[in-house]
């Protein structure tokens, strides 16, 4: 078997680390998170892609070791809210529960509840040069109340199109098969396997 590929992950979100490694480990790729105190990127981009690059480049700068660095910028875009919370999903309110409460309050009843999750991935080398990017999207609708306890973030109120369940009612493997992150990462893994060693 080919040697394991190790990639430093520029994130302070442990849920991302867990989901990404669950998908990547069977392909002999391991993502190692940067320790949070070293990692303070200035996420001032205007798109998911820009912020993913800002975080990946910052990871390459603050790390003394490692050849490859990746970051994930993701979020929930709600049609009725003109794409909000979007790139501000992590900062929409103070806690995950308050973020969901605010979202449900802003949508109230009987509104267009169509939404989608986006995940942009950016992979750079140790000089911060972009090697590859990927983007994944999953469409759904915002439910009227929370359901399910799996996953994280907005998962309990995101009803996946074509399945009568919220993302938080899916198993880890089910979520990873169809999620924005799962789709982007699966394509990133194909690129890594063909291009890195
Ligand atoms: P890093 O920037 O350190 O990676 P973060 O959580 O701040 O961590 P983002 O800026 O990319 O990351 O914001 C992502 C937010 O979008 C996340 O905190 C959730 O609120 C939401 N989100 C992203 N992916 C999600 C998913 O799979 N399920 C539920 N919510 C998700």
Image (cartoon, helix red, strand yellow):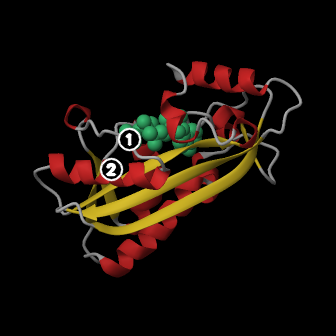
Q: Position of residue 42 (x, y in %)?
A: 31, 38
Residue appearing at x 48%, y 61% in the figure:
185
Q: Nearer the viewer, residue 7 or 108?
A: 108
Callout 2: few (<14), some (14-19), or many (20+) C-alpha neighbours within 10 Å? many
Position of the C terminus by quadrant: bottom left
Query: Which callout, 2 or 1, points to the residue nearer the camera?
Result: 1
Left or right? Give the position of 96 relative to 18: right
Element on which disc 1 rests:
loop
Compared with residue 168, is residue 197 higher up or lower down, i.e. above or below? below
Left or right? Give the position of 32 relative to 17: left
Residue appearing at x 41%, y 46% in the figure:
45
Position of the N terminus by quadrant: bottom left
Compared with residue 181, is residue 134 higher up or lower down, i.e. above or below? below
Element on which disc 2 rests:
helix
Could you tell me if the residues under marks 2 and 1 are in contact, i.e. CB atoms within 8 Å? yes
Q: Is residue 151 at all visible to an observer of this figure?
A: no
Q: Which mark is residue 44?
A: 1
Q: Which residue is tagged 2? A: 54
Q: Position of residue 90 (x, y in %)?
A: 49, 32
Query: In which quarter of the view is residue 82 placed?
Result: top right
Query: Does the beta carbon of the residue at mark 2 sit less than 8 Å from ligand 1?
Result: no
Q: CA distance from mark 2 to mark 1?
A: 8 Å
Q: Is residue 118 at all visible to an observer of this figure?
A: yes
Residue appearing at x 39%, y 45% in the figure:
17
């Amino acid at each position: 078997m080919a040697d394991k590929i190790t990639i430093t992950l520029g994130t302070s979100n442990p849920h991302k680390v867990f989901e990404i490694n669950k998908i990547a480990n069977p392909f002999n790729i391991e993502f190692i998170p940067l320790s949070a105190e070293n990692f303070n990127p200035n996420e001032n981009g205007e798109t998911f892609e820009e912020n993913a690059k800002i975080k990946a480049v910052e990871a390459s700068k603050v790390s003394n070791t490692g050849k490859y660095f990746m970051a994930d910028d993701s979020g929930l875009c709600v049609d009725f809210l003109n794409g909000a919370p979007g790139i501000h999903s992590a900062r929409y309110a103070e806690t995950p529960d308050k973020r969901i409460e605010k979202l449900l309050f802003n949508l109230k009843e009987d509104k267009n509840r169509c939404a989608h999750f986006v995940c942009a991935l950016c992979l750079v080398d140790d000089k911060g040069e972009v090697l590859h990017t990927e983007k994944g999207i999953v469409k759904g609708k915002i439910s009227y109340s929370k359901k399910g306890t799996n996953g994280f973030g907005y998962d309990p109120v995101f009803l996946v199109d074509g399945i009568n369940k919220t993302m938080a009612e899916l198993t880890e493997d089910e979520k990873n098969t169809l999620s924005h992150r799962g789709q982007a990462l699966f394509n990133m893994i194909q690129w890594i396997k063909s291009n890195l060693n």
